[in-house]
Image (tube, coloured by chain):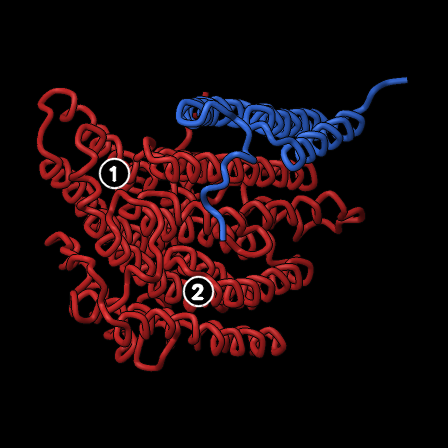
Amino acid sequence: MTVGPGWYMTLAAALFSIGAIGMLVRRNALVMFMSIELMLNAVNLTFVAAGRALGTLDGQVSVFFVLVVAAAEVVVGLAIIVAVFRTRATASVDELSELKG
Amino acid sequence: MIFPDVSWAAIAPEIALVAGAVAILLVDVQWKPEPRVLGGIVALSVVAAAVLSVGQWFRLDTPSDITIPFGGMIAFDRVSVLARFVLLAVTAMGVAGGWRLFERLGRRAAEALALVLLATVGFSFMASSIHLVMIFLGLEVGSISLYVLAGITRERPDSDEAAMKYFLLGSFASAVFIYGVALLFAGTGRLALLGQRAFLDANIVTRPAVLLIGMALVIVGLGFKVSAAPFHTWAPDVYQGAPAGVVGFMAAGAKIGGFAALTRILFTGFPLMADEWASVVAIISALSMGIGVVLALVQDDVRRMLAYSGVAHAGFILTGVVAGAAAEPGIWFYLAAYTIQLVAGFAIVAAVTGSAAGRSGLDAFAGLAVRSPFLAAAFTVTLLGMAGIPLTSGFVAKFGVFVSAWQAGFSWLVIVAVLASVVAFGVYLRVIVVMYMREPGEAASPTPSTAARWMLVAATVSTILFGVLPQPLLDLARNAFSV
């Protein structure tokens, strides 16, 4: 039995869902951020699988763009999380409740 | 080896803006000048970009004149130029309106100003790209700059909380958007919008599930960015916590970029699936208007009120999106009118409650008419414009998109929209009453910077002028579209 692109896309959909659920239920900023990274990697897997199935390079090229954007997000995101951690010594978003109404 | 067709003319305004951002950072490292000098560089590059855009406008003969250089990534047409005009106006007014913030940031001013320019470049590319990956890049360049701007006064707990919330929810939205793009790619085998349209034209899609899910995710992702309900939850917290001096630009820039990308994707890439997306967009629109005005009514913080009113306005603009490409001039008139009012509103908030501060309780506006008649009058005109009172640009804007939606057969949506507009009037009236009827407290008179004064004059005049004489701007918008 061969593993076709459809299986990879199903796996990617599962990974994306796990990431999205993790983002919604976890309360630690770092874990939420990891969930977002998981979602972006699911996107990459979808791009590669679809590109392979369709016989075009566009899918694999797109992965580079997504990777670079994810790296840029890591730079800014970790800096913001560190700044928050310095002022309150916690990375739990439940502690961030100054702003509500 | 085939080289892609490089047309520097198509991206000359963006190059001017990037050059400005780089120049600011280099000049700051070498000479550590006053913020005033850096502001001059911003002004220079924005004016250069505007002049280059005017040149592009006249180089493009007709609305249907479109070339797609850079391997089909960039659309060189009047739509992108029109979007960039609005964006540059908002950038200039945003920086002028929040000038006190940049003065106070000291050594950090260069970073903040460079980020403002880079965010403008990102949103400008969102408007001028015709390829889904390029739209994603523009979205991210703009969004990541805004995450940093929200936390630029990071010592203040409000500000870093706002940055963190904006970052987490914004990145989540970006991931949803790009997954939608991946699914659209899987469904059509193409990433360029015109290619996708041609594919749908030539093929009958037998199993549309992947396409439909992809399209839904793209709409959700962009719905986050323009703060449409039910994806608006980040907006009030971010607008309240971020330094007041940049909130106007943040809110307006994200709305322009988001709607530019949304209209481009839906109208250029997927007009053949309009039956599918129009009903989804109509529901999001109705939810945004309802949730926006009701929650705006109960806010005691002017910034949260403006944030929820922004949710409602996203809903109003979406009534035009529902109507399809025929409504595009109306959508852009609305965006131009509303985003100018938005930056003006936040410039006034920044002047009254401090440009680096978070929070702007309604009490701070008590008796503003006595303490600063100029600011009170400007805020009144701005709020009436947002409410859509006749003889303001807001009325013409609302009228335009509502008529389009009605003609497209969404009469129920127009009824919801009109009801929401009536309720929204109460939202704005409440602030006006506080400014004119309540006794001023001990608070000192606010002193906006000279730049902010001129910017407010310009915004107020444009709100009234485009309400009384909307025709020139409407013609300009119509000349950008072939409908």
Q: Residue furthest top?
A: A1
Answer left or right for B314 relative to B93: right
- The residue at the point 65 percent across, 37 percent down is A24
User: Which element type, helix, strand or loop, lies under badge 2?
Assistant: helix
Q: Amino acid at mark 1?
A: Leu
Q: Can you identify the residue that label 2 sits on?
A: B331
User: Which element type, helix, strand or loop, lies under badge 1?
Assistant: helix
Residue B385 position, x and y percent, is 33, 72
Q: Can you identify the residue that label 1 sits on?
A: B17
- The residue at the point 62 percent across, 36 percent down is B179
- One can see residue B474 in this view: no
Residue A28 position, x and y percent, is 58, 27
Q: Residue furthest right?
A: A1
Mark 2 is surrounded, within 10 Å at the Cα level, by few (under 14), some (14 to 19) or many (20 or more) other residues, namely: many
* B207 relative to B460, above or below: above
* B444 relative to B119, above or below: below
Total marks placed: 2
Q: Which image quadrant for residue B147?
A: top left
Camera-side residue of B389 and B24: B389
Camera-side residue of B181 and B89: B89
Mark 1 is surrounded, within 10 Å at the Cα level, by few (under 14), some (14 to 19) or many (20 or more) other residues, namely: many
